[in-house]
Structure formats: structure tokens, C-alpha cells
Image (cartoon, rainbow, N blue to C red):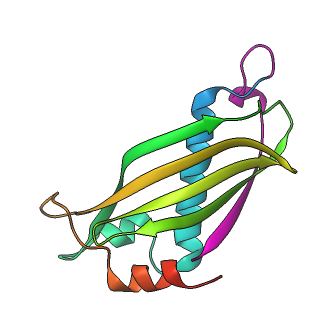
Amino acid sequence: MRKFIYKARVYFSDTDAEGIVYHARYLDWAEHARTEMIREMIPDYSQTALSEGEDGVFMVVRSINIEFRKPGLLDDLIEVHTGIADMQRFSCTVHQRIMRGDDLLAELDIKIAFISSVTRKPHPIPAFLVNQLKTEA
């Protein structure tokens, strides 16, 4: 399945008074990586474009499991490695690893549910998106 790498720098605003990354920032970086992966896979469809029309869908976080391994530090260059671990009809599980070089800082498994932008009820993952997610990059 498709894999994607998103790069970021740890800024002062990402850290506490000791220069250690605040735990919620890992969720932000993971979200940014998933969004940029979608933008790269289907350039004509931003998340806004995916939600438009009668068959529009929203991707919503259903659950998150995160394991913190090592602290991120001020000025670190990090990479968020993102891949699809599992796909079901109405959801997928995204596996993400936040790395500093060879050091694993955090590992996340995020279940994404697809819901209709009209009814707000579960909606099958659009076929064109399934095809893109299954394609090797």
C-alpha cells in the first residue's frame, strides 16, 4: 500500500520550557502528514473538494493509539512516515511513525472513518480513493 513521508522542524512553539516536544504536537504532525498524503495522491481533491457534492465524504478520526518512544527536541528535523495499514468498506487504519533520523519518537495507529457530508452517516470509501490508497507510490 501507499507510503508517504512528511518533513517538519521542531520549533520553539512546539516545545515546553525544557525544549521537549509537547505531546499534542505529535497529533498535529500526524494530521499534517495525512492531509499532505491525500493532496499528493489526488491533486485535484483537497479535503474540501472530497466533501463537496451529493457523494461527498468527510474523513474523521474514530480512534487513535499513540506510543511515545523518545522525546523530540527543539530544532530536530523530523519525518512522519505514513502508510495505510488496513482498509475496510467504511474506514481505514493509518500507521504513522514519527522519526528523527533513525530514532523512533512516536508511533501512531489512527482509525479514519468516512462519513457522508450530506447525511453525516457512514459512507463507503470512494472507489477512486481506494485505488489510490492501494497503489504503491
The quarter of the rendered structure image containing the N terminus is bottom right
Where does residue 133 sit, x and y in percent of width and height? 50, 77
Badge count: 0
Q: In percent of the image, x 39 and y 86: which residue is there? A: 128
Where does residue 57 sit, x and y in percent of width and height? 28, 67
Q: Is residue 91 magenta?
A: no
Q: In percent of the image, x 45 and y 67: which residue is there? A: 86
Q: In percent of the image, x 17 and y 76: which residue is there? A: 54
Where does residue 116 sit, x and y in percent of width and height? 20, 65
The answer to whether 105 appears left or right of 115 in the picture is: right
Position of residue 117 relative to residue 132, above or below, is above
The answer to whether 57 appears left or right of 1 in the picture is: left
Task: Choose between 54 and 130: the one closer to the eye.
Answer: 130
Q: Can residue 43 be seen in this view?
A: no
Q: Does the magenta stretch include residue 9?
A: yes
Image quadrant where residue 24 sits: top right
The segment highlighted magenta reads: 1-19
Q: Residue furthest left?
A: 119
Image quadrant where residue 27 sits: top right
Q: In percent of the image, x 78 and y 38: which residue is there? A: 10
Q: Which residue lies furthest to the top in this view?
A: 17
Task: Choose between 71 and 67: the one closer to the eye.
Answer: 67
The quarter of the rendered structure image containing the C terminus is bottom right
Q: Is residue 7 visible?
A: yes
The answer to whether 34 appears left or right of 5 in the picture is: left
Where does residue 63 sit, x and y in percent of width and height? 39, 44
Position of residue 97 relative to residue 123, above or below, is above
